Amino acid sequence: MTPPQKSKAARLVSLLLLPLLLIGQPAEGREPVYARKGMVVTQEPLAADVGVTVLKSGGNAVDAAVAVGFALAVTHPAAGNIGGGGFMLIRMADGRTSFIDFREKAPAKAAHDMYLDSSGNPTQDSIVGWRSVGVPGTVRGFELAHQNFGAKPWAELVKPAIDLAANGLPVSKSQMDSWRGGHAENLLSRFPESKRIFLKDGAFYDWQEIFRQPELARTLERIARLGARDFYQGETAHLLANAMAANGGLITLADLHDYQAVERTPLEGDYKGYHIITSPPPSSGGVGILQMLAMLDGTAYEKTGAGSAETYHYLAAVMQRYFADRNEYLGDPDFVKNPISALLDPAYIQKRRATIDPARATPSDQISPGLPSAGEGTNTTHYSIVDDQGNAVSVTYTLNGGYGSGITLPGAGFLLNNEMDDFASKPGTPNMFGLVQGERNSIAPGKRPLSSMTPTIILKDDKPFLVLGAPGGPVIITAVLQVIVNVIDFRMNLQDAVDFPRVHDQWKPDRLAVERGVSPDTIAILKRMGYSVDEGYSALVEAIRISDGWLQGAPDGRASGKAAGY
Ligand code: DON
């Protein structure tokens, strides 16, 4: 689509600026993709096209979200899935909101210390192989979303994924690279079915070679015909339970039969005239977004400008304080009490804010979880969709690590998650993402592990303004925060806001991770302020902004996603 036409005055200004353009553009950055009616932004282009086709044929944003979710399970096997779980945040044009929680659950045979060896140390069993798998939630979650909010017949939404799996898709450069060498090759080679399907038995797929997944096509056909019943009670359920029993896994037919996705009430809050709708527990992300924005509000942190050392310092400071709370207080709301109102209480936020030294980093060991006493008891992917009615959907779902547990279910053609590692296998000890978490997120049968996935929708004047989210583990929360402040506080265009270099601090380890692009001078100042700075990575944010009658789509410039609109 072409961008909006400039007004006469703007054209005049452009003409006056022409001499300037010859010596360099004013730093406006890359334009987002513009559209009028509907927009789908995903990490993988073919799936974005599936979403737009559904929207154009009269499907609403939830229909498109279901179709995109199934398509990504075929086109983006590192994270797109039916063998994992996630969250779908929905805001319908009539004002209804819903948070569909289809996070995996620990199987009934799971136990608090199941991943500790005889000396009490965590093993790799929570990360690789049959015992690392949580009971998958994706198919139930999509079915629940569709039942409550969808408009098109279910089978029509699964069909594009079946076609992609049966007819095959040309292997992209990034997919080819992902399978060769490194993590995927190491992991997938350990399981014959995964090695055969994804690594071509070690021969590897070439660029543009057609990759077909006939077993997955058959599984999806059953799901199209029978719905989630196939996955949780039917042939797929039996394939999964039998393979688990044969390989020392824990998931049984009863676990599958009992799995339910649930609708939860999203968290909501306000920031500078914008209304934030975001993810409640078992996501830890929404509490983080609201807490960190509230801590920033009133500091005037933005006065030194985006990318300045002082701005990054304040961002890092609120991140540290939030993560200290997150790791201690949050867990599955069906099992532990999450002290959300205490964590978001303005007096508490004010107290936390007051501990930020404007000129110095606070060492992590001087920051503790801050509530007086909470008392007892007390490689993911994201896509954003907006339709022509103004319904907005934000989905993050995952297998946890890239390609999950490494296991492809024999006969069914899909990868299984390793979500069990999101629990604190040993409270107080770091997990795969270096998160040092507490007892509230320890393992128990039927419990959901705490997540960082943070699908978020922001309203302005009661209408969707920003739809976003990301994969990446804990960096999700800090990436979503930074894109929000880049748009609201620093007035960047959406693509710039997404692409702008980010920082990440998760309290422990005591380290400020900065992306390439943060200037060496800024890094030097941050070091002088007391930060121990490392090069780090951030998450892949896929975002939509709605303003002035235009939909703007911004896939994260760090990868090869796509914004497709019409
Ligand atoms: O739910 C979580 O927080 C993690 N399982 C997310 C993992 C993830 O984002 C990996 N992505 N690249």
Image (cartoon, rainbow, N blue to C red):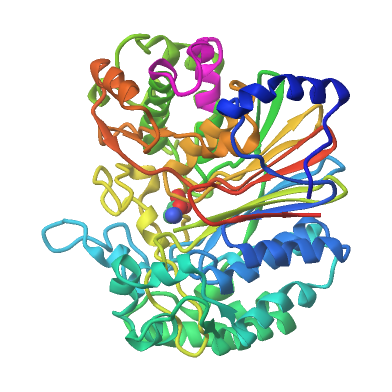
Q: Is residue 6 left or right of residue 159?
A: right
In this view, the residue farthest toward the left is 119
Q: Please state which of residues 499 and 363 is positioned toward the viewer in this rendering.
A: 499
Is residue 464 shown in magenta? no
Q: Could you say where residue 167 lies in the image, as x and y percent from the top left?
A: 64, 86
Judge by depth and name the residue closer to the eye, 226 or 397.
397
Q: In this view, does 461 lie above or below 243?
A: above
Taking the spot 40% from the left edge, 87% from the top edge, the residue there is: 196
Prevailing secondary structure class for the magenta stretch in the rendered image: helix
Task: Identify which residue, 423 or 466, lies in the foreground.
Answer: 466
From this view, report whether residue 118 is shown above or below residue 210. above
Is residue 299 on the magenta stretch? yes
What residue is rendered at 82% in x and 60% in y? 55
Task: Point out the stretch of residues depicted in magenta.
Answer: 291-311
Q: Residue at x 24, y 46 (%)?
A: 429
Q: Please provide percent x and percent y for residue 106.
A: 43, 63
Residue 420 image point, x, y percent: 38, 61
Residue 376 visible in rendering = no
State whether residue 505 is above or below residue 431: above
Quadrant placement of the C terminus: bottom right
Q: Can residue 506 be seen in this view?
A: yes
* Residue 320 position in % (x across, y down): 36, 27
Left-right relation of 227 to 58: left
Q: Is residue 408 left or right of residue 181?
A: right
